[in-house]
Amino acid sequence: MNPESGNPNKIDLPKRRQLRRSSLWLRITLSMTITAVLATITVGYFAQIRNNKTQNFLGEQLQKAEIEKAENHISALVSKEAQIINNFFIDIESKVNGTSSFAANLLSRDLTSAGTKYWDANVELVRLPSGSWDNSNSDPSSIFAPSTFNLTNENISNANALSRLDFFVPDIVEDNPNILAVYYGNHAGYLSYYPNIDLAALVPPNFDPSKRPWFLQAEESFSNNLNQVVWSAPYTDAAQHGLVVTGSIPIIDNNGIFHGVIGADIKLETITNQVIDIQVGETGYAFLSDAANNIIAMPDIGYSNFKILREETSEGEESQPA
């Protein structure tokens, strides 16, 4: 008989060791469980943070990609439309340059031998009671000269030579609906205007084309040795053609002598309609302004957004030759 078996508080050594081992395994298991739970929570927390960061990063990248895509679209659209407008003016400039070159060739000839078989200023020019000079309304061009103009040999020779513009300019005006008029003026006050609009009945008898902006700008181009087409600021045409610009260029003969200016009035209706029709996205639009920030073309919504009146954008200047 075990001498200690009578003590109820006594646990034999093997059982004690077993209990201790069980308690130790319980603590280890519990610690591992708690650690695993904490690790799971920690990993989940950082995974959530990482997921949020990833989503934010992807969102930012998507936003940047969309912005870049929109910017590229707008840039391509602007470049395309700008090229169309640029080509429009390049084509007009070629016509104005061609007219100037043709006039220069006419004036580079021996003026004293300019033929009169086609048209003779001595016969065709008529002095009006006001003192100014006029020609027949059936001629291709409308000719005006102020009361200070005299039929000198030089003026007659110039007029006779330039009458050959009748074989060149009318086709330009007829074939280009955006060209309202092409005209020639010199320091003597002589003005030949295509098409024939009976100019002498529209301007005062002392009207001097050499004082008009289109003439002065081209003459300045000659003075600066540029001899290129000069464009006016847009203005409102008096004949209800809307916004108009004038391109002018000096006429220089083979000897480098200045003989006058070729001008052309160009209506901007084609360009303004083109700009107004441009749509950027669902609500975007385009507008066109000149170097002085004058609005040339803008849809109605633009005027509303900027809180400006359409009439505030027009300069109200009359058609320049008149």
Image: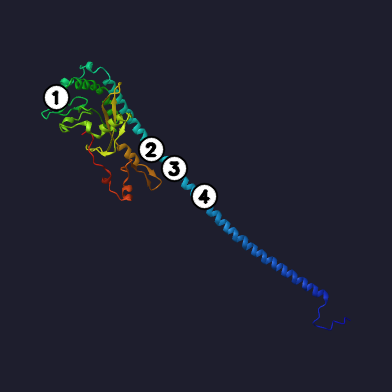
Q: CA distance from mark 1 to mark 4?
A: 78 Å
Question: Dot 1: what SS?
Answer: strand
Q: CA distance from mark 1 to mark 2?
A: 47 Å
> Circle 1 sits on which residue?
126
| Mark in the foreground, 3 or 1 | 1
Query: Which label's residue is closer to the chain start, 4 or 3?
Result: 4
Q: CA distance from mark 4 to mark 3?
A: 18 Å
Question: Dot 3: what SS?
Answer: helix
Q: Is residue 162 above or below residue 285?
A: above
Q: Are marks 1 and 2 in contact (CB under 8 Å)?
A: no
Q: Are marks 4 and 3 in contact (CB under 8 Å)?
A: no
Q: CA distance from mark 4 to mark 2?
A: 31 Å
Query: Looking at the picture, which amino acid does disc 3 mark?
Result: His
Question: Dot 4: what SS?
Answer: helix
Q: Where on the picture, by quarter, is residue 196? A: top left
> Circle 4 sits on which residue?
61
